[in-house]
Image (cartoon, rainbow, N blue to C red):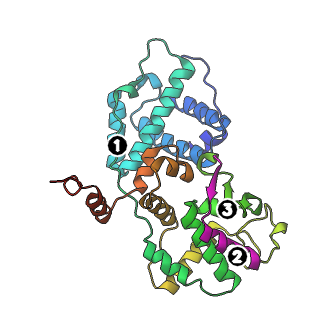
């Protein structure tokens, strides 16, 4: 099924032919034509396959057989299979997108979209833990040497924290993306293939300058002329970046943090330092504020500081 969806397009014979699998294949082709990112296409395919498997078990072959209750049964089926709330919500969003697309594509007379009567499953917005600043400081202290590896790793840690760039975005950076004088790096293909500019503070610019001064510039021979190179004169990979973090954590005698933890640390500390959420949204390349909110866990300490500053009683003449 997955292979079929990705590589074939079975065109329905007539508008009245509402075979679910055939229209799913058409939907995937349409998403490809819209030039969606491969990761997004894969997401759609995997979620639609789950729904198709459910339909096959229930002997449901056609879209006109779908009802609100069947969709609710499908969501319950996913829960029984052990899918977490976030995954179930993703399945619901995908099915909703597919059915809305089919409704617009076919304009079936007298057909009522069953998903309109199904409420989206609730997902608790659980905060994502950032890498603690204390741990980041310990990691940076392990880069105090003057070898190219030390200087490079220090610059990487600074750039990750100062830009909020995703690990894959950092590995994809090329020399042509960097404007060292202006202190900017162009992320050419962020999530969803959307480009954006990230900015460097003065300390990060200095660390990056030190890296560029010591960097052995043979990367022009590598496709794209990558900004971050290994001692073997190869582009730094995601696996290699993860290995750097593992090695630095061992030297710092701390538990290895997640790469994405730096992105969360950027978001939380940006706001703590007085930044606003709408600018942060653009800097991080998020189209939806709902996604961004998961990064913004306020600790009890944050809340205590805010209350002390803005207490109605303490700020009155009572």
Residue 258 appears in the figure: yes
Is 189 or 182 nearer to us in this picture? 182
Residue 224 is situated, as x and y percent measured from the top left of the image, at 78, 60
Q: Find residue 154 and report its image quarter.
A: bottom right
- Other-residue count near label 3 (Cα within 10 Å), few / some / many at <14 / 14–19 / ≥20: some
The magenta span reads 194-215
Q: Nearer the viewer, mark 3 or mark 2?
A: 3
Describe the element under mark 1 as helix, strand or loop: helix
Which residue is tagged 1?
77
Which residue is tagged 3?
183
Is 100 or 256 nearer to us in this picture? 256
Residue 139 is situated, as x and y percent measured from the top left of the image, at 52, 79
Is 258 or 66 nearer to us in this picture? 258
Describe the element under mark 2 as helix, strand or loop: helix
> Is 31 displayed left or right of 308 in the figure?
right
| In this view, 106 is above or below 119 | above
Q: Residue lying furthest left in this view?
A: 318
Which residue is tagged 2?
211
* Badge 2 or badge 1: first in the primary sequence: 1
């Amino acid at each position: 099924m997955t292979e079929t969806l990705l590589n074939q397009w079975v065109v329905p014979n007539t508008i009245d032919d509402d075979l679910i699998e055939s229209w799913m294949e058409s939907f995937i082709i349409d998403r490809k034509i819209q030039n969606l990112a491969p990761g997004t296409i894969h997401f759609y395919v995997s979620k639609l396959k789950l729904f198709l498997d459910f339909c096959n078990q229930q002997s449901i072959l056609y879209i006109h057989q779908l009802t609100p209750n069947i969709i609710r049964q499908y969501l319950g089926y996913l829960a029984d299979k052990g899918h977490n709330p976030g995954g179930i919500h993703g399945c619901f969003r995908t099915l909703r997108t597919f059915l809305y697309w089919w409704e617009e594509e076919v304009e079936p007379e007298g057909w009522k979209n069953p998903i309109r009567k199904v409420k989206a499953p609730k997902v608790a917005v659980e905060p994502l833990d950032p890498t603690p600043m204390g741990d980041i400081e310990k990691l940076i202290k392990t880069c105090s040497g003057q070898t190219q590896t030390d200087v490079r790793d220090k610059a990487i840690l600074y750039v990750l924290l100062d830009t909020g760039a995703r690990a894959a975005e950092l590995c994809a950076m090329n020399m042509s993306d960097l404007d060292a004088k202006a202190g900017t790096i162009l992320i050419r293909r962020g999530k969803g293939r959307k480009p954006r500019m990230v900015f460097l503070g003065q300390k990060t610019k200095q660390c990056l300058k030190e890296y560029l001064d010591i960097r052995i510039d043979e990367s022009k021979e590598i496709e794209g002329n990558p900004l971050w190179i290994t001692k073997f004169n190869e582009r730094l990979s995601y696996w290699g970046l993860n290995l750097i973090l593992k090695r630095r954590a061992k030297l710092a005698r701390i538990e290895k943090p997640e790469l994405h933890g730096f992105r969360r640390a950027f978001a939380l500390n940006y706001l703590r330092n007085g930044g606003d959420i709408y600018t942060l949204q653009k800097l991080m390349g998020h189209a939806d504020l709902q996604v961004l909110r998961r990064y913004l866990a306020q600790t009890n300490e944050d809340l205590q500081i805010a209350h002390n500053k803005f207490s109605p009683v303490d700020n009155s003449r009572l």
